[in-house]
Amino acid sequence: MMRSDVVKKGATRCAHRSLFHAMGYGPEDLRKPLIGICNSFNEVIPGHIHLREIAEAAKLGVAAAGGTPLEFPAIGVCDGIAMGHTGMKYSLASRELIADSIESVAMASGFDGLVLIPNCDKVVPGMLMAAARLNIPAIVVSGGPMLAGRFHGQDVSVSQSFEAAGKFAAGLIDESVMEELEEQACPSCGSCAGLFTANTMNSLTEVLGMGLPGNGTIPAAYTGARRLLAKRAGAVIMELIKNDVKPRDIMTREAFENAITVDMGVGGSSNTVLHLTAIAHEAGIELPAPLFDEISRRTPYLTKLSPAGKHHMQDLNEAGGLSAVMKELSRKNLIHLDALTVTGFVGDRIKDAKIVRPDVIRTVDDPYRKQGGLAILQGNLAPDYAVVKASAVAEDMLVYKGTARCFSSEEAGVNAIMAGEIHDGDVVVIRYEGPKGGPGMQEMLNPTAVITGMGLKVALITDGRFSGASQGACIGHISPEAMAGGPIALIEDGDIISIDIPNRSLRLEVSDEVLARRRAAWKQPEPKIKTGYLSRYAKLTTSASTGAVLQ
């Protein structure tokens, strides 16, 4: 008995078989398991421009192993191209569309298994959410990271392109240099070269056990290796069906703890707090924010990849990849070795792994920092939680007090920074950009990159979120958000904000009495968008503290 029998067996399925025949599928094809190949190829995202080749290789693997592959599409948004305008409101919201659309096609089609082909920011978690929700055999094979560009003898990536805007505004570079950089920063297909959100999520897919070794790190431009990975993934899905291994067998609490541990060990994107929480939710597992901090406190920070350092994903791949990182972390008993993967157990997968480049992956005895890359902050400004990529914060900004400069949109904040209205010692507050208020919880790469490019010593806090390419004292996901009446809505220009990352504190230096008066006077503003998908999303989404999932 196969799941796909519901669309192909029995007299009542005569019409169904006719429809399959119309597409060139004969009885010999319908006797085999039907494997949905979800391909997020498009011509808008550099990380997805090559995914037709990955899908073809996966289909070859499925067919060779005795299955019938059937390809269908998924949407995708390029966060870089969407950045800094209304388009960014749609990025996080697209995650739910991706999960819902895969569920719709898989259930309508009776697939026996799924090969999911993502690469960029919201597509990876959206596909993993769908896999957990459907709980039919599934494997993820990503498109791989972009190679770093070369500019004046240095490795660069898209993050330097964003920072160039700030350098140009500050008069540090001229237009010709900026143009030269933009032509060199992104030299190949693939997800942006640093340890930004896409590459973090592709790496954590591997750690979760839902992808093969190398899924997170083999560069997209290494076409032979990538095609081989996809072909093997196509074969593995047939084994998963044979052995009835489902995503929830793999994505257990232990697997998520492994993913969080590696995330902290490599200094991944702050967006992983949102995405891992959302994926776990679909698997029926709760990941409270304090768990991330608990794991961070005991996990040494072993790699310093862009934006925190000079290395890129190709360096991590060369250094031994995620398996080497996991093997090293296991020396401190930080990895659940008995967690299941699509190809057996974690312990077996990493037993022969080794660090090839100690300049890229440090040992647990000599880490960059004794604690992990992310920190969860709380205080009267963030009663639920806030998140910061501590690994990308300069030492002299880990503890910081500054004067609030408040803006009710990302655009207003960027305009003020570019106009020279923000000075050392300020804290830029960008609010009403949360899941409901944005709506869609925009990334704040433009303001953080401009701040970095201009060399300003300021912090930025928001109920929105940050790109994995952001660096500096950037604190996001402040919950409750401003639109829900959270304390961030009550800040006034001139207030003192206290940030203490080592002690996990984020406070507004205003008395409870003053805050109570401000809260009583606060009125919820009108929604920024009142029609279409985002209007519906704003009404249905939960807080960032619960993964910004739809109710």
Image (cartoon, rainbow, N blue to C red):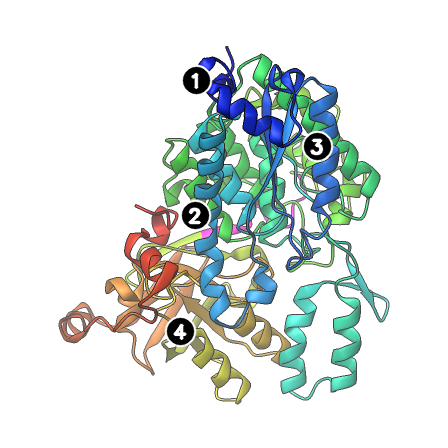
Q: Given the image, on which type of amino acid does mark 3 rest?
A: Ala
Indicate whether residue 542 is drawn in magenta: no
Secondary element type, mark 2: helix
Secondary element type, mark 4: strand
Q: Residue 413 appears in which quarter of the rendering? A: bottom left
Residue at the spot of label 3 = 58
Kindly identify which numbered label has been placed on residue 429: 4
Residue at the spot of label 2 = 96
For marks 4 and 1 on the same chain, the one whose residue lies earlier in the sequence: 1
Quick check: 427 left or right of 224? left
Rounded to the nearest angstrom, the CA distance separating label 3 from label 1 is 32 Å
The magenta segment is: 365-375
Q: Residue at x 83, y 38 (%)?
A: 224
Rounded to the nearest angstrom, the CA distance separating label 3 from label 4 is 46 Å
Q: Quadrant of the C terminus?
A: top left
Query: Would you call the spot at circle 1 few (<14 residues within 10 Å), some (14-19), or many (20 or more)?
Result: few
Q: Nearer the viewer, mark 3 or mark 4?
A: 3
- The answer to whether residue 287 is above or below residue 122 is above
Rounded to the nearest angstrom, the CA distance separating label 2 from label 1 is 34 Å
Q: Residue at the top extreme?
A: 1
Q: Position of residue 397 (x, y in %)?
A: 52, 67
Q: Is residue 300 visible?
A: no
For marks 2 and 1 on the same chain, the one whose residue lies earlier in the sequence: 1
Q: Given the image, on which type of amino acid does mark 1 rest?
A: Thr
Q: Given the image, on which type of amino acid does mark 2 rest?
A: Glu
Q: Nearer the viewer, mark 3 or mark 1?
A: 1
For marks 3 and 2 on the same chain, the one whose residue lies earlier in the sequence: 3
